[in-house]
Image: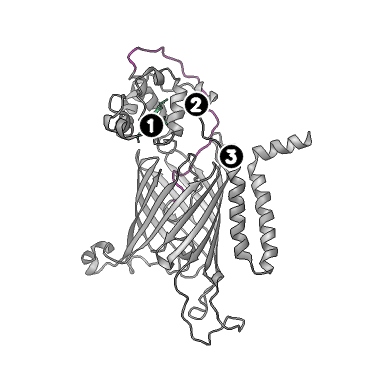
Amino acid sequence: MIRSLVQQLLKNYQIYEFAVIWFEVRIFCMFVYLFKYYYIMKFNALILLFFIELFNINAQNLWRAPQEFKQLQNPLRDRISAIQKGQKIYKSLCASCHGDNGTGNPVMIKTLNPPPADLTTGLVQQQTDGEIFWKITEGRGLMASYKNMLSDEERWAVVSYIRKFEKKQTVVKQDNSTEKTNEVESFSFSQLINAKTTFIRQTKGFGFNIQHRFGAAKFDKNLIRNFLGLDLASNVRFSFEIPVSKRFMFEIGRTRYGKFYDLGTKYLLIKQTRNNRKPISVAFYENIALTTENAPQYSKHATFEDGRQFEYKFYHRLFYDTQLIVSRKFNDKLSGQIAVEFVWRNLTPYIKHPEEKAYVIAFPVSLRYKIGLTSAIDLEVMPNSHHKTMPISLAYEIASSGNHVFQITLTNSDRILTQNLFFNQTLHYPKDGFMLGFNLVRYF
Ligand code: HEC
């Protein structure tokens, strides 16, 4: 009896399960640290977590809506205003694949596998509004999830419009539905501008990200000559993100400055629910980055602080970033998050900069405000314990579907990887100029 109770608890509260594992791993690391293999063990801990998650993988659902969604009533069914709104959304987001009249865009039918469903057939029209709503919400494969792009109301409006593809009229149903409890996603992508979000993609496949920063453009006579900085030296990070389960993902990245290779993992501890029983989402993020830049050049007599002679070891190349991220979607337009972040480097450039510390504690704050169906403004401010840096970023975001986002960024630092974002001085506006850039995310 007690056993089943505990099992029930663990099942419902994976957070405890995770916390226990993490705690054990940490204690283990602490012991190992004494033997100076901390960095290797920390890496192993990530791999361990990865395998734990691997056994947890949720099998891909059949393309069948869960029972509770089938019964959901469309609150906007047959409302003229909703149908018109649905038509507008359909034309701008869905028609490219499903065709203006719902039978499917002939080009897409030939190129996509499986092809976009014919929305006019009995196969679709015989489904309940709730089922279609769920499919638009969750997506599958090439059909993106519209959970984050469209509000509930907008998705119901599209369902109402899709119903009009059917010739015969159906009975008008009264609206007395109550919202089902389900999970809310605060952000649509796993990182905003530089900050990691609580988002983990819920479908199989992987994501490819490019984060690109151009050089600093000053407000001087070279502003136009340098084409607003777009001609200047730049930083770039390429990364792949791979969701392993609904709560766990990892990412692998390569950044130009520092020639860093990084391995990140994210674990979703709590996910916000619509009924506010869980008012926030919480995720744990951990990243290890390895610089492959040449060893720093110091004189032969250079020593560590404690007097030992300086010698460049492998573990000096490692930088760690640990974050606890808390996010909340306040309404259909506004989402926000705050994180507690701890960055550690194994080698501090003490000789050249005696004031530098090995660590930084930061409190990144991110906001996203939707200004249209597909566009949003993102803002990030990252107060931290370093004496010279205060990364601030602004972005205009266009998400043409749940699978794709493009951001034009304005930042005061050309660093991308958080491990060196805080260790390099940020620009002072407007004296030092500004930096343009872009982020591109594509899910496959
Ligand atoms: C990139 C092309 C693409 C876009 C854009 C797209 N879809 Fe789809 N849609 C698909 C594909 C492909 C499938 C079949 C997915 C499957 O069966 O795995 C599909 C399936 C569906 C289904 C499920 C039909 C069934 O089998 O029950 C519905 C409903 C649907 N789409 C509605 C929409 C709506 C509404 C939009 C716009 C908000 C939209 N789609 C945008 C490609 C697209």
Q: Is residue 147 above or below residue 441?
A: above
Element under label 1?
loop
Q: Residues within 10 Å of mark 1 (few under 14, many from 20)?
A: few
- The percent position of residue 378, horizontal first and vertical second, equals 40, 50
Q: How many marks?
A: 3
Kindly identify which residue carries mark 3: 278
Q: Amino acid at mark 2?
A: Ala
Segment tinted magenta in the rendering:
166-191
Residue in the picture at 66% in, 38% down: 11
Kindly identify which residue carries mark 2: 65
Q: Amino acid at mark 3?
A: Lys
- The percent position of residue 340, horizontal first and vertical second, equals 55, 56
Q: Position of 310 compared to 379: left or right? A: right
Examine the image and state in which quarter residue 341 appears: bottom right
> Is the distance from the Cβ of mark 1 to the nearest ligand 1 atom less than 8 Å?
yes
* Quadrant where the C terminus is found in the figure: top left
Q: Amino acid at mark 1?
A: Pro
Kindly identify which residue carries mark 1: 114
Element under label 3?
loop
Q: Would residue 179 be counted in the magenta stretch? A: yes
Q: Earlier in the sequence, mark 1 or mark 2?
A: 2
Examine the image and state in which quarter residue 394 appears: bottom left
Nearer to the camera, 311 or 435: 311
Comparing labels 2 and 3, the label whose residue is closer to the camera? 2
